[in-house]
Each structure stands twice: as C-alpha cells, then as structure tokens.
Amino acid sequence: MVYSLPEEVLEHVFSFITSDKDRNVVSVVCKSWYEIERWCRRKVFIGNCYAVSPAIMIRRFPEVRSVELKGKPHFADFNLVPEGWGGYACSWIDEMSRSYPWLEEIRLKRMVITDESLELISTSFKNFRVLVLSSCEGFSTDGLSAIAANCRNLRELDLQESEVMDLSGHWLSHFPDTFTSLESLNMSCLGSEVSFSALERLVAMSPNLKTLRLNRAVPLGKLSTLLQQAPQLVELGTGAYSSGIRSDVYSALSKAFLGCKELKGLSGFWDVDPSYLPAFFSVCSRLTTLNLSYATIRSPDITKVINLCPNLQRLLVLDHIEDSGLNALALSCKNLQELRVFPSDMYVADANVTLTEQGLVSVTQGCPKLQSVLYFCHQMSNSALITIAKNRPNLTCFRLCIIEPRTPDYLTHEPLDIGFGAIVKHCKNLSRLSLSGLLTDRVFEYIGTHAKKLDMLSIAFAGDSDLGLHHVLSGCESLKKLEIRDCPFGDTALLANVAKLATMRSLWMSSCAVSIGACKILSRKMPMLNVEVIDENGTLNPKLDNCLVEKLYVYRTVAGPRSDMPGYIWTMDRDSANKI
Amino acid sequence: MDVTLGLLPGIPGAGDGGGGVPPGGSILTKSKNKENNHNMSIEDSSPYPVDDNDDYDDGGDLKLGLGLSIGGGLKTKEESFRILTSQDSPILKPSCSSSSSSSSSSSSSIVGTKRTAIHSVSPPNATSVVGWPPIRKAHRVSILANRNKSELEEFSSRPKTKNITNGHHLTVKVNMDGTLIGRKVDLYAHTSYETLAQTLENMFYGRWSSTEAIGSSRLLDGTSEFVLTYEDKDGDWMLVGDVPWQMFLSSVKRLRIHRNPKMQH
C-alpha cells in the first residue's frame, strides 16, 4: 500500500524547511514533491545570474517573495573584470515586476542596476520590504529617492559598498511623514553629505530602527543627537570619528552611548581621534561585532578597546593592531569566531607596525571558537601554519595574503607547501581557502587529497605546472568556485577535467597559460558551459589556436549564451557567427 | 634550471589586462629553493612547537610522478652579500630600450623612461600588478587617503621633506626586507654611493650573514642577494646609483634594501 500525505500537509511540513540546499533535495524526491515544493518556495538564491534566466525561475517558482542574485565574478572586487562586463539587473527586475507582484525582498551582489530599475521596484511591489545592493553600481541618489518615496513598508535599505552617483543628499527627505517601518539603513558608502535634518527626522520616526550605518560625512557632533533618538539601536556605523578638541561633543557622545543598552555592533570609525575612543567604552562589554578596519589608531589604543570587549565574536581591524594587540585579543576574547586583519599600507611593510605571523598563531591558540580568518601580512612560515592548523582544526575559512607574491617561508626559505598542506589536512571542514606566498605543485597535491569540503579556492602567483591545477580539479569534490590568477596552469589540466566544470558554479583564470584552442575544444565538448574569453586589449587572434587568452570565465548555465556581452568577450558562438 | 612561471613576453593576449607590465618584467622566475634542505627539521629553526613535521616528506603514495625541478644552483652562505646598484650586472637591467633615468617626466612612471628597481614582481608602490594585493576598493581608498594624510601632515610640519634636514643633516629611513625595525642614516655624512653602501652594510651586517665580515663595500660589482633602492620625490622606487650623488640627495626620501630573488650567476 502506498500512503501519501495530502498536499496541504506536505506543504506545511515543507514550510519549515528554509535552507536552499534542503529545498533542492526535497524537490527531487519525486514528481509530486517537486510540484508541491515549487509552489511553496518563497526564497530563491541564484549564485550566478547568468546560470539561469528570469523566465526559467519564474516558471518554476511562481510564488516567490525573496530573490537573491549575484553577478560579476569575485575578482571584479580587485579590478580584474573590465567595465561593461555585465551583471545587469534590468531584465530580472523587469520580468519580476510583471510576475511577482508580492515580491518583498531583493538582494543583489556585484550587479549593475539603474535608477529606472529602482523606480520600477518601488512602484511594482506593494509589499516591498528589503533592498540590499552589495557592491553594486549604475544608480544614483535619484533611484534612492524613488525607493524612499514609494516603498511604504520598507524595512531594510542596505547599500553596502556600492558605488552610488551622489547627485543630492536630499533623497532621504523623500521618505513620507507616515513612514515608520524602517529597521535597517546602511548608507556608509555614500560619498557626500546627506541632509542631516532629513536623517534626524527619519531616525525619530523609526521606532523599530535596529541598524544604522552612517557615512563618513556625518560629523561626530551629530552622532549623539541620533543616538539619543535611537537608543534601541543594535548595530551602529559611525561617521568620521573626530571633532577637534570639543569636550561638549565628547560628553554628549559619552552620555548617548550610555543610553544604548542594546548595542552589539560598531563600525565606521573613519578619521579616528583616539581621545574620543573612551566615549563608547560603556557599550564594549556587550559588543559582539567591531569593525575598526578604517581606523588608523595604534596598537595601544586598539588593545585598550579589545580588553573591554570579552564578548567579541567578530573583529575587523588594520594591521596596526600588531602582534601585541592580537595577543591581547587571544587572552580577552574567548568567543571570537571571525578575525580580519587588513594592511595599512599596500606594498611596503611599515617599519612601525609589528604584525607578523605570530599574532595569528596567538589568536588561533587562544580563541577556541575561531572559524574564519582573513589575514594580510608580510611574512609567514611553515611552522606557524602547521601550528595554526593544529590549534584550530575547526577553521572553515582561511584566507591568507602575504603581500609580496611568491614570498617563501621566511625562516627556511622554502615554499609554504607543507604549511598550507597542514591547514587542509587538519581543518576538515574548510570550505574557503585563499593561498599566497611561494607555492609549488605540491601544495595542490595536498589540497586535492585533503580538502574534500572545500567550496571556494583562490590562487595567485602559485604552482609550477598543469599538474597543480589537475590536482585541484580532480581531487576537490565539493569545489564550486575556483579563481586563479598569474599561475602557469593551462590547457592540459583544463581539458582533462571538463566534466568537473559542470559540477562547479564558475572558474576564473587570468594571466595563466590557457590557449584559445583549448577554449574552443572546451566549448565544443561542454555545451552546458558558457566559455567566455575576455580580450580587453584586442590582441586575441582566434584563428591561432595556441594564442594565449588574457582572462577566461567559465560557468555552467541552463540559459544558453548570454545576450549582453560586451565586444571584448569572445565565445565560440560569436566566433561561428562571425564566420558565417 | 629555473622554472619559468607566468607568461612569456611577445605572446599576444598574454599580458595582465591593462596592467602595463613591461616586456622585460613579465618573465617570472621562481626564486631558488633549498630543495636539498627539505628534510631539515623545522623544530631547529622555529620557535613554535611542532611534533610531526614528517607528514609531508616525500612519501611514495602521494607522488604522482611529478618531477619538481626547482631551481638548482643554491646560493651558498659563502656568497658575499653586497648591495647592488644600477652599475651591476646587466641581467638586472630591464630589457626595454635605453632609458635616461634622469628624465622623469610625469609621475605616472612609464617604465621606458625610468629605470625602476627590478624585482620578480612589481617593486613596492608600483601599480603594474593589477588587483594585487586583493583589497576591496573601500579599503584601498582608505589606505591611500591615510597615507596622503600622514604625508601631508609631515609635509606641513617640516619645511622641506619627510626627512629631518636642517642643512647639516639629511637623515632618511632605511628598511630592509625581512627586517621589521628600520634604521636611519644621515646622507650628508657621505660623499658617494660607496661610503653609503659601506655604512649600510655595517648597519645591517648582523642580519645578512652569520659568517665573517664582508670587507670593503662592493657596490659596483659582484652579485648580491640584495638590491638597494630608494623612494624619490614622485613616490617611485628607483635603483640607487643611476644619477650623480648630488642629484640623488635632492630627490631621495627613503631607502630600502630588497632581497633580490632573481639571482643569476
């Protein structure tokens, strides 16, 4: 006998399943489950906007309330992707405006969105609540005005690190007097001043405001006013954190912070005047997140702050923290989960900044919950890496950037192969890894052998031959995103692992040794991949099969070749079309 | 035999997109690897307690038939450590055509007109490696802004340059790769590159080798692991020795001793 539960019951059960991965698994159990699941899926995450088309998404999931899309490759963050590459949100917004009247949330990352699209969003979705534009571009404050004016139920507006054309600071005034639903506002990326009175008014009429991230232009003197209006804030991003020598500003600020009993996260801190730091000491004991990565304060001041924050879970800081500050962190912050240390100078080690591998070792030793590390430094050793691996086998994200490419172990002058090898061997749940320093093919052998849960790998200036790439592609079972620059990896490894590419989201290779001939072969063999060659200099000669390509971006897709490619991208289709 | 990484010049489409890497600079060779010291115990050299460092010895099962031909010709410790300047071996000079190092026109250093310090990857402050180090724009902008701000502050508080100069002294910072604590040297106390190099060798002597003293400075010949460079008024890093001494004094802001991995014999 076959028992089957009625649809309504299954739907109710499925409503408790929120993770995308679980939903995907549920949908392939059988045809009826696929049908039921697709009608009740409310959230869709699309990691590569070109992997699927809006029409396909809408056809399969008709009742979606929340869409998240990612556009450009990750290396676009570092200027490796030329202008006009793509990632346009326009067609998505257009089709969703027609088919998803009840859409509530849109989250975009590394995409290009215009003011017209923003206006369309603001008028098409009556219940629109959340707009997150992370590292996006193509819009201005006019688009923001439309959002402010028309989205009556807006809860979250987050412009994280987007490039916004700053036409006017008055977009904030477009929020109507009846607007009271705001919970989260992040405008830290805006370059110019916003109208302060509009900001004050907005904060005053938003009793549910939990997150407020100001931009640099908001003066410190005004911060206390805002804090007094919003003592319920949980996350605060300050503006510039200096104000000359003003004891009245200091005492007002100090008093305002005292009133913020819910504050858990702090960020901002541009242009820090250390004498104003104690103003927020009263909230330190509750802080779980602290972002000082724009603050050029020195180690003693940073250490003072850290010693007051025993509940810190996430710390972002410049290398001014130095080893001494990291030692203090290891002693004080036993709940630390994530650490990011950024360089204060891009190339030269500042002789006044003593940040070495030792600081990182201390933290991995002292902080048992540490899972995620991003660390810029100038020197590293295999022994330190091995120690880190053994101290912290629970690491899930390890990104090390030794600033000078191909820097060897500074003690032994050997490659850092065995150090990174220890990391992948001991940290069995490692899902993200970025390599740096002097590395031979051997490190890739270790990675292919041990890094079975690795989801994303970033490689630069490493390896000796195709064997390195082959180890990774053939060994890393869970690999979804691979980005490589300036490595001697080429055709052989690529063509030996074509099937692997269909199991991954994307592969980026720039300044490597891949030839156009191999790209042609790959395109022919794997029709479900888009093989896009970026030829910005116009020097590519597609007829010469052994001509090397500048940049290659390969990704799986069910949407076929994209129609919005700029002229400098070569694909097999375009090549054939030209020949006709 | 050196292992060539990266790209060979002259192959179309093989450069960094828009990176402006000079033809001579795009041959990337790996620094010499002490392959035969691979089995050296890590515990001997490191302050960190390590128990099993033999996980990654050349066990048979992990090998996939790859012959790692790491560059031979190890630099031995008997090798004398000398500072290299532009008068040294032509290997270090860029392969691009004649350059007059004194003709520094614009501040966007075009490699053809300036002889910049040769390094297997771009010298500090150079922008010829696009997108490296991998820092997002917001942080990059912040770093540059802070640097300009501190230079501006120093500039406004001192009449001339960052360096302490009162007509009798021109004291500049000297940093060396692998050394965190820098030194300062009074350039006015020297009359030529020779004496400067000698002084620097004396200053950093302890950090270069554990063997006996090197003897008189051999700036002009020999091949050393080290290259002496300086930052000029434009913020560019240049090889020391190209210009007359007096001209050098008028444009130098600080010095740096680089470990030069591109050693040839």
Image (spheres, coloured by chain):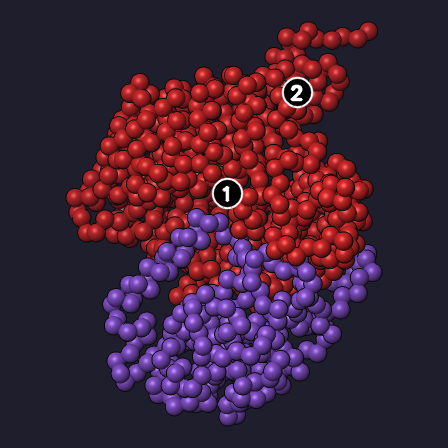
Chain colours: A red, B purple
Question: Is A309 placed above or below B170 here?
Answer: above
Return the residue at label 2: A60
Name, please, the residue furthest toward the bottom. Answer: B216
Name the spot of residue B195 as percent of width and height, x first: 43, 90
Q: Are marks 1 and 2 on the same chain?
A: yes
Residue at the image point whose x is 48% and y is 29% from the top: A117
The quarter of the picture where residue A252 lies is: top left
Classed neighbour count for the residue bearing mark 2: other residues with Cα under 10 Å, few (<14), some (14–19), many (≥20): some
Name, please, the residue furthest toward the front. Answer: A580
Q: Secondary structure at mark 1?
A: loop
Which numbered disc, 1 or 2, marks the residue closer to the eye?
2
Question: Is B168 placed above or below B231 here?
Answer: below
The quarter of the picture where residue A193 lies is: top left
Name the spot of residue A79 as percent of width and height, x first: 53, 51
Please name whichever residue, A53 or A261, is drawn nearer the observer in this view of the structure.
A53
Is B163 on the left or on the right of A415, as rendered?
left
Return the residue at label 1: A337
Q: CA distance from mark 1 to mark 2?
A: 38 Å
Name the spot of residue A323 as percent of width and height, x first: 45, 59
Residue at the image point whose x is 54% and y is 30% from the top: A90
Residue A386 visible in this rendered orientation of the protein: no
Residue A161 visible in this rendered orientation of the protein: yes
Residue at the image point whose x is 26% and y is 28% from the top: A201
Q: For the C terminus of chain A, which image quadrant?
A: top right
- Looking at marks 1 and 2 on the same chain, the residue that comes earlier in the sequence is marked by 2
In the rendered structure, the residue with mark 2 lies on which chain?
A: A
Q: Amino acid at mark 2?
A: Arg
Is A347 on the left or on the right of A514, as rendered?
left
Q: For the N terminus of chain A, which image quadrant?
A: top right
Please name whichever residue, B77 or B72, is drawn nearer the observer in this view of the structure.
B72
Residue at the image point whose x is 23% and y is 48% from the top: A243
In the rendered structure, the residue with mark 1 lies on which chain?
A: A
